[in-house]
Image (cartoon, rainbow, N blue to C red):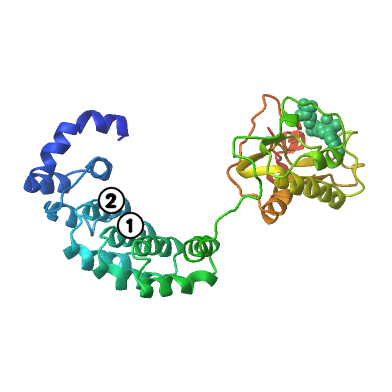
Amino acid sequence: MNRQFISQQITGELIDKLKNDPKDFSSFLQNQNDGIIIYVLEKLGKLENGYSKEPLQNLLNHSNENIRALSIKNLAKIQDINLLPTFIKYASIDESTIVRREAVSAIGRLRNEKAIPALINFLKDKDPKVIMQAIRGLLVFSSNSNVKNELKKLLNHPNELIREVINKEINGVQYQSKSQQKHDEFPEFLKNTVVHGDVQEIIKYVPDESVHLTFTSPPYYNARDYSIYQSYDEYLNFLERVFKQVHRVTKEGRFLVLNTSPIIIPRISRQHASKRYPIPYDIHPLLIKMGWEFIDDIVWVKPEASVKNRNAGFLQHRKPLAYKPNAVT
Ligand SMILES: C[S@@+](CC[C@H](N)C(=O)[O-])C[C@H]1O[C@@H](n2cnc3c(N)ncnc32)[C@H](O)[C@@H]1O
């Protein structure tokens, strides 16, 4: 059943009516399919302290993990410290990671000192997302010296996001701009300027942290006559040098958009194989190492395949291992 169909059947008024009558709500939830229960739980809205817990508690052993997680999410809205043992139980024993995460989040959302020992306990969890929820709950009490000490223990945690959050919260490590300029200012001489030259020379004249966006389509490795390099290593070194400079000139929190794709160097004869170079995948770790943060990839679907008829052999003899799709980017 799709959501549009459900939304026609289960109106806001019906949800409000059910919410205000726990008995009706319980029996309604028992007789509906998973899709409807999820829809209702998502639309339940605010629940005041003192709201009847029973209809939601009845769902905590439901076979569907999303229903269990949403029940906990809604129970957390009631802000009832008596629910702490329930949240601890499901955070500890549920086999689903989304339920455990939601339960630890619910413990944190109680914002009650009584929850501190349980949250500290979940800092040792195997799942980094559970730990993150426990950290979030504990940060409310970060002035408490015991909490602070426990959080400090995570400074060398194997997970990089946990280390980053703890470092920021405990050591107050935050980016400090070296530039005197305001974020929306940049040197006048860069305004509407077109430069013809080798990027490696030209970029030296661009001051640190003066650029908001670089959008570039660098040469593809030996695919055209303007891009001839002795080796793939030399090519990657060139890109690495340039993008380090681009990082230097970019303002904090601003962007580099890199248009690139794998390329094929065709075989020299039928006795040899062509070679495919995965440029985006090879440049990516270099970019991360020099300080760029990955935001997203955008797939450019061009109307024409960039390398056509790569599956001609397959079309003749239909041997599956010979299948090569035509690349569209
Ligand atoms: C894939 S093309 C991108 C073309 C560009 N999108 C355009 O529409 O003009 C790569 C371009 O980089 C230029 N190029 C190659 N090496 C360069 C360098 N060291 N400095 C500046 N430009 C360079 C090439 O001349 C080519 O125009």
Q: Name the side, left or right, on which 221 lies relative to 106.
A: right
Q: Are marks 2 and 1 in contact (CB under 8 Å)?
A: yes
- Image location of residue 234, percent across then percent down: 87, 50
Q: Looking at numbered disc 2 in the image, what kind of residue is underneath it?
A: Leu
Give me the disc on residue 70: 2
- Image location of residue 75, percent across then percent down: 21, 54
Q: Does the residue labelled 1 lie within 8 Å of ligand 1?
A: no
Q: Quadrant of residue 185?
A: top right
Q: Name the side, left or right, on which 169 lies relative to 226.
A: left
Q: How crowded is mark 2: few (under 14 residues within 10 Å), some or many (20 or more)?
A: many
Please indicate, yes or no, whether residue 223 appears anywhere in the rendered image: no
Task: Report the residue marked by disc 1.
Answer: 102
Q: Which residue lies furthest to the front in this view?
A: 180
First of labels 2, 1 by sequence position: 2
Residue 73, compared with residue 9, is above or below; it is: below
Q: Nearer the viewer, residue 53 or 246?
A: 246
Q: Residue at x 54, y 60 (%)?
A: 173
